[in-house]
Structures are given as C-alpha cells and as structure tokens.
Amino acid sequence: MILRVLPIIVAVCMATSVAAQQIVTLESYLQLVERQHPSLRSATFEPELAEAEIRSALGSFDPLVSMSYEYKDKSGADKLNLFEGSLELPLDMMFGPKLKASYTRGLGTNVNPEQLTTLPGEGSVGISLPVLQGIFTDARRNTLRKAMLRPDLARAQYQLERNTLLRSAALRYWDWSEALSALDVADSLLRLAQTRATFIKRRVLAGESAGIDTVEIQQEVQRRIGERLRALRIVEQFAIDVSVFVWNPDGSQPNMALLRPFPLPLDEGAAVRLEDQVVQARALRPELQRIGVLQETSRLDSALASEFLRPYVELEAGLMSYDVSAISKLDYKVGVRVHQPLLFRQASAQVQTAGIGVQRADLSRSLLERMVDADVANAIVSVDRTRERLQAAEQEQDLARRMVDAEQQRFLSGDSSLLAVNLRERFYAEALLRVISARADLARAFINLRWATGTI
C-alpha cells in the first residue's frame, strides 16, 4: 500500500514546497530580467546615440556665418577699414545647392582695389550648385542618409542583445525548474523510505521479518539522503545562476530563495511547420534587420563613389549691388569652377572598393539567412524529437510504477525481498527523472524556437 500512494506523496511534497515559496512564471521572470539588467540598460543608450549621430549629420547643413574685420590707422586717417561677412546655407536636395549671401565694405587709403567699395558697401545674393559630380549625392548628403539609418540599426542591436539575454535567462529558468522537480522526487522517495523503515521496524519487532531488513532499509534511507543533498545542491546552484540575471533598482541582487519557478509544462501546443517559422524568423530576427541596414549603408557608399567618376563642375550665379543703399540698381555675377584629377584613378578605386563592400554585405546576408533557417530547423527538430522522447518516458514511468506496485504485493506476501522492492523504486525514480528531463528539454526547445524565430 505504501508504494501505491507514491504519486500522492510526490504531489503533497510539491504542494508543501510551493506553499512555502512564491511562484514566479517564466514571463514574470523575464520581465524582471528585462527591467533592470545592466546590458539592456546600456543598450537603451543606442537610440540616443543614433539621435546624436543624426543631429551631427544635420549640422553639415547648418547655416554658416563668416565675418572678419580689419582696421589700420595712419596719421589719424583710415589706412585700411575692411569688413567682410557672408552667410552660406547648404540644402539637402538634388544637385546639393548652396544659397549664399555676402556683404563687403572696404575703405581707406591703402585698400586692395579688388576690395575697395562704396561707403555703404556692396552685397550679393546667389546660388551655387554642381552640374556633373554631386547631382544625386555628395559626402554631406551621404553622411546624413547613413545617419538616418542609425535608429534602425540601434533598434536591431537592442533587440539582438535583448533576445540573447532573455534566451539565456529562460534556459536557466527551466534548468532551475527541472532541478526543483528532481528535488521534489528525491524528497518524496526519502519520505517513502523513512516511512517504510518505520514499517519494517514494526515487522521485525513482531517477528515477521528478519532483523537484517532494518539494516538494509536504513542503508537505503542514507542513500536517498545523499541523493536529496545532491539534488538540493543543484537547486541552490541554479537559484544562484538565475539570480544573476535579475537586478534590483539599487543594483543589489534579489533573494531568489523566496521564489519558485513554475512547474515544468506538459507540452506547449500543436506541431509547428518549418515554412511558417522560417518566414517569421526572416521577418523578425534582429540579425537580419541589422544586416539589412549594413547593406543599405554599403549601397549609399557605392552611390557616392560613383559620383566621383564625373568631373566636379560647379556653377555660381547671383545678384549683387555695388551700393547697398541703392538696391533698386542690381547687377549680376556668374562663375564656374572645375576641379578634377584627369585620370580618375582614385575615383575608380573607390568605386571598386565600394562595390566589393556591397557584394560582401549581400553575401553576408545570404550566409546569415542560411544560419537563421538552420536555427529554426534545429529548434523544430528538437521540439519534435523531445516530444517523442517525452511520450516514451511517460510510458516507461507508467510501466515502472506498475512494477513497483507488483513488487510491493509480492514483498507483502513473502515472495520478494526488500532489496527487490528498493531496486524497483530506484527504477521508478529514474523513470520519473527521465520524464522531468524530457519535459525540461521540451521547455528549453520551445525557448530556442522562440529565439530562433525572433519571438522571445
């Protein structure tokens, strides 16, 4: 009769442990991890860095004010009285035009004739723009385009660090739950052996069993005490490992001994299809999102390099007044600047280098997609095989329990020995642990599947 209530003893033992501790679910635990973990708090700075990079790139299009003043006196008269000021505004648009405004006032007896102006001074307003190189992009606009991709890269990097952290934390969580389940089994078997020891002692005193049986059962009790202590050490180890992932707001480490993980799940739903999971993984995995940003960045660099294969020709035109006090009378000025090495060797080398960068980025994405597909396939295979293993372990557990009941009946009728009963119990305990191991592996397999598909 004692062995027939073994499952009840296991359940009571687990209920007693649960009543003494607060259960924390996996999702609640991961929320604790995500809330205060230093690596994620550090990763939250990435969006701020991206914003700063965008602001820095936009700074290349800030209005640029330039002013200078020089004065020289000779015998109480102006030898040189020169003021120059200009305002330049680059625009983020095709052709990369720049709006320019300038004012010059040059007086004195010793002024360069080119700088000599009327007393009110002269001013001009105009525009300059490239007509060959720099029509579609230039270094300034390219830097801004790349900076605009930085927030996407920051989000992908944060998600990558988050997924990696939560995966490690979740696997440790189920390690912890598995260890506690194994400890519950060890506790139950120890209580059962202690109960049987009392039963055997009464039988020996009544002359129904040999005195050596008390020695044998005490030996079994001590063996199970050792097994329980080993299981307890594993639980304590994983409780410490789990606590490493959780941080209090003040940076201290919480006491995980007051908490208990959720029991190992029986199963987590229906079969999963490889095709659906691969599509989901390619859409959500942050590694692919990050390589997508790097691909776009390499294409921007390639487009910029192609611009340098054309000569740099800049046209400038503007309206000007030689006397700012008489703006109604305007003149104009035009100019052209050409600046280009004749052999284009540096430009062609830059195009070649940038093209290689694009090809490498594309190849890296192809390789990464293959790795993501393999991660998903491995995770699904792990789920399927672990489910089959769990079914086999549960059948073994049922058969082992039936053998324990049968051996106990034989022992009570005098057809079996205490050693045989103890061995049957050990086999049953091993079957229980194999079920626990299979359930834990199944839970971990689903964690790996969630990580592989980017849904953790």
Image (spheres, rainbow, N blue to C red):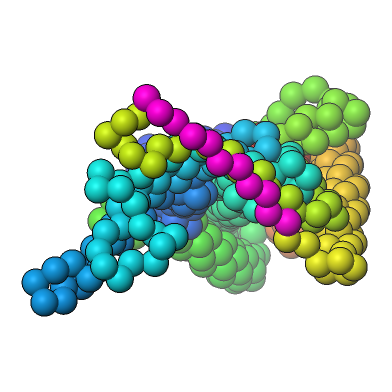
The extreme left residue here reads 76
Q: How far across and how far down the image is residue 153, in percent? A: 62, 46
Along the horizontal axis of the image, is 242 left or right of 294?
left
| Vertical position of residue 60 compared to residue 197: above or below | above
* Residue at 58% in and 39% down: 317
The magenta segment is 328-338
Residue in the foreground of this view, choosing between 156 and 448 = 156
* Residue closer to the observer: 240 or 149: 149
Would you say 408 lies left or right of 189 here? right
Q: How many numbered discs, if any?
A: 0
* Position of residue 438 measured from the top left corner of the image (x, y, whole percent): 76, 45
Q: What's the magenta bit mostly, secondary-structure-wise?
A: strand
The answer to whether residue 335 is magenta is: yes
* Quarter of the rendering occupied by the C terminus: top right
Any part of residue 369 in sight: yes
Q: Is residue 398 left or right of residue 52?
A: right
Membership of 74 in magenta stretch:
no
Give me the residue at 64% from left, 59% from top.
209
Query: Which quadrant holds residue 346?
Result: bottom right
Residue 25 is situated, as x and y percent measured from the top left of the image, at 49, 36
Q: Residue at x 83, y 63 (%)?
A: 347
Q: Nearer the viewer, residue 45 or 315?
A: 315
Residue at the spot x=45%, y=38% of the render? 320
